[in-house]
Image (tube, rainbow, N blue to C red):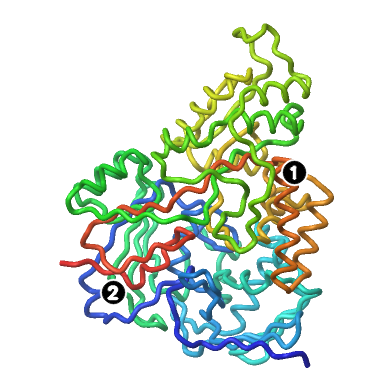
Amino acid sequence: MKNLRLWTLGVILLGGMIFLGFSTHTMAAEQVLTIALDTNPTNLDPRLATDLNSARVYQIVTNGLVKKDPQLNLVPDLAERWENPDDKTYVFYLRKGVKFHDGSEFTAEDVKYTFESILDPEMKSPHAAVYQKIDSIEIVDPYTIKFVMKEVFSPFLIEMIMPIVPKNTLEALEGKAFTTTLVGTGPFKLVEWTPDEQLVFEANPDYFEGAPKLAKVIYRIIPDETVRFLELKQGGIDFVQNAIAPDLVPVAQQTPGLTVLAKESVVINYLGFNLKDPVLSNVKVRQAMAYAIDRQAMIDYLLKGQATPATGLLSPANWAYEPDVQMYPYDVEKAKALLDEAGYPDPDGDGPQSRLKISYKTSTGDLNIRIGEVLQDQLKKVGIEVSEIQSFEWAKFYNDVIAGNFQIYTLRWVGITEPDILHSIFHSSMIPPNGRNRGYYANPRIDELTEQARLVIDVQERKKIYSEIQKILAEDLPYIFLWYPHNIVVMNAKVKDFVLYPEGNFASFKDMWIEE
C-alpha cells in the first residue's frame, strides 16, 4: 500500500458550504437577519443549480463531505476524516447522529445516492461531467463509504463539496428532485419560498455543530439596486453582498449605522462570445475587440475603482495563476489594424458607417446595462457597432446564454479556486447541457491539456500545465477577461461576526448575530 494520507477533524473552521458556531438556542429565539438578493434562485436542487443565488440557498441549508476554510483549504464537513490509500481510492468516515431537516438520519446511503443521481442521464445534471471519472461507490458500512476512480483525478476532493441530499425524501418526490423546497443537514431549514418576494429560513436547533445564533434568516428579492440601498438605510434589510451600485458604496461608507467591508475576490467578470457566429469565430475580431475595450476606464467610471483588470480566468489569488500571458492594453489603432486583417476594412475612412454590427445581451440590472452602453461607445471608435443592447429578466437571459441564443454577453464566474474549472468551461465536450462551455469554444490542445492536468497529482506539475492553458486562452480569447471585482458587503452596524470570504459566499451566517 502506498503512503496513507489521512485527514482528521482537528479544529473545524468556518467553511464555504456551511456556517459553524457555538451559540445557544435561547439566543437564536431572538435573532432575525434580513438580506437582499437581486434575483430569484433558478433551482433549489444543488444537483441542478449553477447560479450564485441558488448557491446562496444551499450554502446555509446543506453540507458536503468536505468544505473550505477561510484560507480556501479543504477541511472535514459531513465526513469526519478521509483516507486515500492510493491515487485512485478515497475512503470517507462519516459523522454519526446527523439528521436531515425532515428527521431522517444521514448515512452512507445518502452519499451514494447523491452522486449516482448526478450521474444518472435522466437527471441531466450540469455537474455530471466532473464525476464521470468515478468507477464505483461502495458502502462499507452505514458510516463509511469508498470511491474508486477509473483513473487518477486530481480535483476529486474539492468536488466532494457537493451538497448531500436525502435519498428517501427524494425518491418519494415526483421527478426525484427538489423544486419548491430543499431538505439538508445544514444550520438553517428552508421553510418558505415565495418567488419574486422572499425565502425564509429557520434555525436548525439540532445542527451537528450547535444551533445558530440567528433564529431566522430572510432572503428578500429586490431587483433594483437603489431600492436595496434605501432599504439598508431605513432598516428594512440588514445585509447586502455585491449587490449595490458601486457609486453608492462611498455613500454607504459615510452613512451612520452602516458598515462597509471590502476585499479582493476570486470572481471574474468576462465578455462572452458565441463562437458559432461567423463574425465572432474570427480570432482577429475578438482580439480587436480586446484592444478596443478600455477596461481600466470602465473600472474607474462604472465600478469606482472597486476592481482590478483581469488577465485570465484565474485571479492572482489562485495557486495556478499565470501572469505571463498575452495582454491587450487599450489601443484603438491596433484594434483597427486587426479588423483590417480580419477582412472588415473601414468603409468610409472613419466616417459614420460601421465595419460590422453585433448585439449585446444582458440582464436588467442597471450596472449590466451600463456596461453594455460603455462597450457600445468604446467599440464604436474602431468601427464595431453594437446595434442593440438587449436586457431581459435574469431567468430569460440565463436560459438564452445556456441555449446559445446570443452574440456577446457579460457574466461573472464566482468562487474560482480549483483550476480544473478550465476543463468544464473550455473543453469541447463541455458545451451545454453537458457542461459550461457556453461559447462553443473548441481547441484540441486545450482539450488535451485540461485532460492531462486531471491525471497529475503533483501541484507544481499541474501548475505548469495550467500555465500553458492560460497562455493559449489569452491568445484564442474565447472570453475577453474584464476584471476581478472586489467583494463588497454593506450591512447594518449591529450585525456581528460576519466573515468576508474570497469566494463571496455566505459562509459565516451560522455564527452571525445582531446586537440589540
In the picture of the structure, the residue carrying the numbered disc 1 is: 441
- Residue 379 point in image, percent of width and height: 58, 24
**What amino acid is found at the position of numbered circle 2 in the picture?**
Lys
In the picture of the structure, the residue carrying the numbered disc 2 is: 213
Q: Quadrant of the C terminus?
A: bottom left
**What amino acid is found at the position of numbered circle 1 in the picture?**
Tyr
* In the rendered image, the vertical position of residue 471 relative to residue 142, given as above or below: above
| Kind of element beneath mark 1 | loop
Q: Residue at x 61, y 46 (%)?
A: 311
Q: Is residue 408 left or right of residue 182?
A: right
Q: Residues within 10 Å of mark 1 (few under 14, many from 20)?
A: many
Q: Residue at x 75, y 66 (%)?
A: 454
As rendered, which of 381 and 228 lies closer to the eye?
381
Q: Quadrant of the N terminus?
A: bottom right
Q: Residues within 10 Å of mark 2 (few under 14, many from 20)?
A: many
Q: Residue at x 23, y 68 (%)?
A: 31
- Residue 333 point in image, percent of width and height: 65, 22
Residue 50: name its quadrant.
bottom right
Quick one: label 1 or label 2, which is nearer the N terminus? 2
